[in-house]
Image (cartoon, helix red, strand yellow):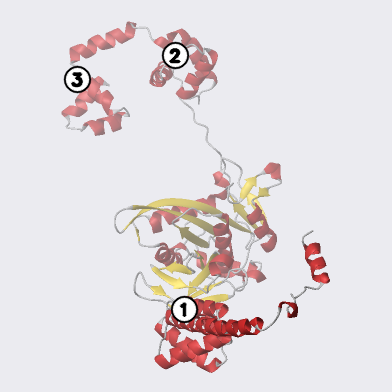
Amino acid sequence: MYVEIRGMLNQKYSISTIARKLNISRNTVYKYIRKSPEEMAEWTASTMTRSKKLDIHKELILHWLREFPDLTAAQVQDWLKEKYPEFKVGESTVRSYVRCLREDFQIPKESSTRDYQAVPDPPMGEQIQADFGFKTVKNRFGKPVKLVFIVFVLAHSRYKYVEYQNRPFTTKDVISAHRNAFKEFGGVSKEILYDQDRLIVVSENEGDILLTEEFQQFVNEIKFEVKLCRKADPESKRKVENAVKFIKNNFINNRIFHNIDSWNEQSQKWLKRTGNGKIHNGTKRRPADVFLLEKQHMRQVNSLNHIHKNSITRSVRKDNTILYLSNRYSVPLGTFQKYPEVLYYVTDDNKLVIYVQESGEILATHCISPDKGKLIQNRSHQRDRSKGIKELIEVVSEHFTNKSQATKYLNELRNRYPRYIRDQLSLIKKCIELGSLEVIDEALALCMERQLFSANDFQDVVSLFKRQRQVNSTNASDQQIDTDYNDIAELTLTDTEANQRPLEDYYTIMESTK
């Protein structure tokens, strides 16, 4: 090896090229080129006579290698640790020793190969294969974005459907993608082949497959057979595996990510143009052409009839909007609580239609805005802030004798204090509760006459009239006291008699205190 390295250096090969061609590390190359021919000769001679740490187990290792030619150096190290727990040896030492033994005793490493058998395509409408894929792309700022996608492939025609997300899939997302795929395929196949993904499968359970609760409900609704790949056997779903690889290499690679909506739109166009429009290497036919025949064999699902074929799932935000192409589009108030997720699609006349997946109820229709960062909102989706104010004005005005005048006054308050009208009405209502009908009527008349359009002014006027009435009442009481005193003075002691409370009143008081 030393001679080979020196020869390649003389031919102006780089260190990296030498390491790659000789299948060694660059550090090993550097170690060799630092030695002169004399030093290398001495070192080689010393290695011929020097004992190695693993020589004490040489025969055992040779026995293992001859019995199990595909044994790895890592397994050799583990077996040595298992047999001799106190024996310490490095991984690189074992790897180098095993390599030397294979070379010296002509024990090539055998790798077990799998024998493949060609399997005929299933009948039309028999099987759909589904699988997930992951790929990191870059956005327009050069930052990485991890995309997750789910692919559905009709096993006979190789017709494909794919959906992307820039967040991990949930079981609800998976179910929604299934519905969209069935809508695209024109129905559902007899069976669907899956990998053992945790969003779908809990356990294979020796053939009695246990599905997640949500997905089991979906299977019961649509009624199709679930078939799983065996563990460590991805070849059984080779068609969808090839589709995932094809999508990564042909569509995703070197494509710039802007947003998930435009990405899904580009994907749909790519499927039509290339994914399903290009001649398949295996079948030598265009999947789109074969699909026209296979579509007739798909079983129709009535609950999918209301789902548009290009629908995409969207989460409803707390402010009752959904995001589409960097804009917010409104849905009716209460949608967030009632329908956390909705579907949408774009019509030919560039309108965004948002609807409920289960029932097909259309929640909103918007004209798509060419701008970015805008809120597109229907008036019917806004909270009717006037609702309740009219009723409140009606209720408050009922307490006045002149209801029409009161309504006029309260509406003027609403015009002057639109933001604080509830506070204004609340204060007037408080005045009504604490004052008499005569007082509030007089206060209303004075406020209208003097144009005192404020609840605080109304409160001050009510307080003024109440004080005046108290003063008048006090003066009247003083006059009555003087009159009574004069009358009493004219009476003799014998003419006076104290008022007596009926005896029954005392019995009532005593009973109530027990």
Helix, strand or loop under label 2: loop
Looking at the image, residue 502 sits to the left or right of residue 362; the answer is: right
> What residue appears at the point 50 percent right and 16 percent down from the top-left corner?
80
Please tell me whether mark 2 or mark 1 is closer to you in this view. 1
Disc 2 and disc 1 in contact, CB within 8 angstroms: no
* Residue 444 pos. (x, y %): 49, 88
Q: Quadrant of residue 261?
A: bottom left
Report the amino acid beneath label 1.
Answer: Gln
- Dot 3 surroundings within 10 Å: few (below 14), some, or many (20 or more)? few
Q: Which residue is tagged 3?
A: 34
Helix, strand or loop under label 3: loop
The relative height of residue 26 versus residue 49 in the rendered view (above or below) is below
The relative height of residue 415 versus residue 291 in the rendered view (above or below) is below
The relative height of residue 254 versus residue 76 in the rendered view (above or below) is below
Choose between 274 and 312: the one closer to the eye: 312
Q: Which residue is tagged 1?
A: 424
Choose between 415 and 85: the one closer to the eye: 415
The relative height of residue 496 versus residue 285 in the rendered view (above or below) is below
Report the amino acid beneath label 2.
Answer: Lys
* Residue 234 pos. (x, y %): 55, 45
Choose between 228 and 314: the one closer to the eye: 314
Q: Which mark is residue 88?
A: 2
Report the amino acid beneath label 3.
Answer: Arg
Q: Quadrant of residue 216?
A: bottom right
